[in-house]
Amino acid sequence: MSELSVNHLLGIKYLKKDDIKLIFETADHFKEVINRPIKKVPSLRDITIANLFFENSTRTKLSFELAEKRLSADIINFSASQSSVKKGETLIDTVNNILSMKVDMVVMRHPNPGSCVFLSEHVNASIINAGDGAHEHPTQALLDTYSIRERLGEVRGKKVVIVGDVLHSRVALSNIFALQLLGAKVMVCGPKTLIPKYIDKLGVTVETDLKTALNWCDVANMLRVQNERMAISYFPSNREYTQQFGLNREILESLDKEITIMHPGPINRGVEITSDVADSDQAIILNQVENGVAIRMAVIYLLASKIKQ
Ligand code: CP
């Protein structure tokens, strides 16, 4: 396979296994490039990309921007809080105004699930989903599975548990799709109130005891409790959540094997994970962030190749 089967990256559910393999092979090349003294290639000198962030972001926004700069694309950055969206402009009007400035590709984060699919059906540009509400965060799942491949050699056959607020997590859904496409076994673990009712229909197992889940897995991906998406309280207090589902050194040392620890960030230190675990050699949290740049370079490069045809 030499090109992606899709013209947009809207979610992992639209990808085939070969798409992910191609993205990983391309990311391997770009990872080597960004470790050279001169970290830049001229590949996308003729491409202009708009980064539209309607929701807060640190890692994803900076990682996309760096990936675009490393590929020599021209970029414009848009933040909803400083824009005419505040004056009542619609999403399609905003994006079409930006596209009339001859933009080829749009990277968008938006609080509404499905907003990137909607945009791809109404505007003439390649769309990359940088996180749409509690729906999907495809580049996060790609960098997560790429980081598992890097640490453990391959993803196929590995057992991965996703722990915590699965209900509000776009990272969880995209990871479930990506891990299953690549042949991993997936479990989710958390309070029953934070596990979607029909999640077993996706072929994952459900566990409510953290130690049982950790004893089963090779990799634990710890999710942040997404208070900003909760209108009501889903557990009695942070203290009780941490007692039952927080990862700490004591529980890791009680296991009879060493597991790999992941977190998509931002971390709530002391809630879902203690600082000593997050900063330990078992954790690959900063490797995930580093790999995000190479993965996003690969996605942008492969989608841009389709625009140029
Ligand atoms: N992992 C992630 O999406 O982080 P940001 O919200 O900081 O982009």
Image (tube, rainbow, N blue to C red):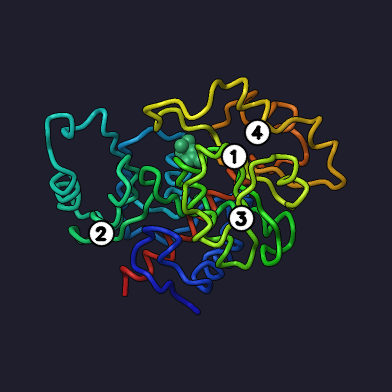
Compute the Cα span from label 2 to label 4: 38 Å
Callout 3: SS = strand
For marks 3 and 2 on the same chain, the one whose residue lies earlier in the sequence: 2
**Is the C-beta of the residue carrying label 2 under 8 Å from the nearest atom of ligand 1?**
no
Residue assigned mark 4: 245
Q: Residues within 10 Å of mark 3 (few under 14, many from 20)?
A: some
Q: Which one is nearer the viewer's eye here, 44 or 222?
A: 222
Q: Residues within 10 Å of mark 2 (few under 14, many from 20)?
A: some
Which residue in the rendered view is the most extreme toward the bottom? 1
Residue assigned mark 1: 190
Compute the Cα span from label 3 to label 1: 12 Å
Question: Can residue 54 be seen by looking at this rendering?
Answer: yes
Compute the Cα span from label 2 to label 1: 34 Å
For marks 2 and 4 on the same chain, the one whose residue lies earlier in the sequence: 2
For marks 4 and 3 on the same chain, the one whose residue lies earlier in the sequence: 3
Front: mark 3 or 2: 3
Disc assigned to residue 205: 3
- Asked if marks 3 and 1 touch (Cβ < 8 Å), the reply is no
